[in-house]
Amino acid sequence: MDEFKFEVTESSGGERIDKFITNCIDSLTRSYIQKMIAEGHCFVNGKAVKASYRVKEEDEVSFSLPESVEPDIAAENIPLDILYEDEDVLIVNKPKGMVVHPAPGHYSGTLVNAVMFHCKGSLSGINGVMRPGIVHRIDKDTSGSLIICKNDLAHGSIAAQLKEHSVNRIYHAILYGVLKEDEMTVDASIGRDPKDRLKMAVVPGGKRAVTHIKVLKRFQKFTYVACRLETGRTHQIRVHMAHIGYPILGDEVYAPGRRSPVKCGGQVLHAKVIGFIHPGSGEYIEFDAPLPDDFRHFLAVLT
C-alpha cells in the first residue's frame, strides 16, 4: 500500500481536503481522491475525515492508496501531431493540456492512450503497462516534443542518453519581467520545497540542475527566451526561472498572483527542439516542434 504524508502550510489553509490532496498528488484525479477518502484512506491528525473537511495550517495529512492490479489501458483514437516515426521511435508534438501517461483515477485521454492506438502494440514495455513507450515526460500544461520508444532496445538507448544528459532539449518560454543578460546559466540544485510539499524549489542538498538561457526577444514587461536543459529535473525550467526572479508567464504554481495580459491556462512553456543519437542507426537526429497557436498568439499580443 502506498502512503503519503503532508503537512499543511499557511498558503493551503482553508482548502477542502480533497482539493489539497489533488494538488499534492497531481497524477490522481479529484474524483478518485474523493472515492478513496470515502473509503477511509485519509486521516488528518490521526482522525478519519470527509472530503468536505477544510485543512488548517500545520495539519498532518495521511493519505493511502490500496494495493491494486494494474488495469488494462485502452487504446484510443486520439489525433497525434507526429514529427517523425520509424520502427524504433515516434516523435510527437504533445498539445498543452494533455496528460502524458495514465494514473489511478485517470485512465483515458492521455498520450499513452493515443500512441497505443497509433502503434498497435509496438511499444517498449520497460516502464510497465501504465507507461508503454514512455521514456521521459513533460507537464500536462507544457506542450512540445516527446520521444516514444517502440521497442525495449530503443528505450534502453534513449534512457541511457537521458541519464548521461546528452539528449539536446531546448524549450521556449515567455517570462515575466525583462531579462537584462542576453545569455546566462542557472546552476542551482532542485529538491522538494520544505515549506510547501506541492512544489519543487532550489534547495541545499537537492539534485544538481543546470539551465542555459538565451534571450530571443524582449518586450516592455516580458522576455521571450530559449532554455537548454543540461539536466532534467522535475519542473526544472519553471523553478529556475522563478528562482532568478523571472517566472514563466501563466505559471500558477511558481508565479501565483502575477497579472497576465492574456488568459494562459497554465505556463507558456514549449519543448521546441529534441535531438539524440538514433538507437538503430547511431546517427544524431533532431526535431523541431512548431510553436502552438496560443503561444504564437501570446507573442503577437505582447509585440
Image (spheres, rainbow, N blue to C red):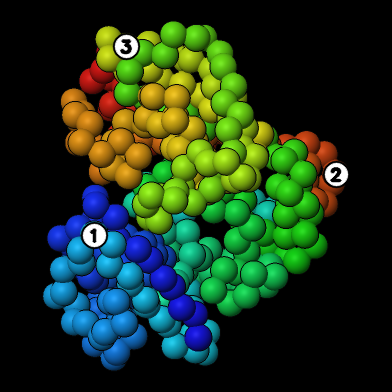
Q: How dense is the environment of label 2, judged by Cα within 10 Å: few (below 14), some, or many (20 and up)?
A: few
Q: Is residue 298 left or right of residue 277?
A: left
Compared to residue 277, the image places residue 57 above or below, namely below
- Reading the image, the residue beneath label 2 is 282
Q: Amino acid at mark 1?
A: Glu
Q: Which type of secondary structure does the marked residue at label 3 adopt? A: loop
- The Cα atoms of the two marked residues, 3 and 1, are separated by 40 Å
Decide: is 67 above or below 33. below
* Label 3: how many Cα within 10 Å (few below 14, some 14–19, many 20+): some
Q: Residue furthest right?
A: 282
Is residue 139 visible to the viewer in this orientation of the structure? no
Whether label 2 touches label 1, CB < 8 Å? no
Camera-side residue of 135 and 58 = 58
- The tag earlier along the polypeptide, 3 or 1, is 1
**Residue 82 x, y percent position in the rendering:** 53, 48
Dot 1 corresponds to which residue?
A: 57
Counting residues from the start of the chain, the first of labels 3 and 2 encountered is 3
Q: Residue at x 42, y 76 (%)?
A: 104
Left or right, 66 with reference to 12: right
Q: Nearer the viewer, mark 3 or mark 2?
A: 3
Name the amino acid type tagged 3.
Answer: Phe
Quadrant in which the C terminus appears: top left
Give the residue drawn at x 82%, y 39%.
283
* Residue 126 percent location from the top left of the image: 70, 70
Hey, which quadrant is residue 186 in on the image? top right
- 156 and 193: which one is in front? 193
Query: Which residue has dot 3 on it?
Result: 219
Tag 1 secondary structure: loop
Sooner in the amino-acid sequence: mark 2 or mark 1: 1
Q: CA distance from mark 3 to mark 2?
A: 42 Å
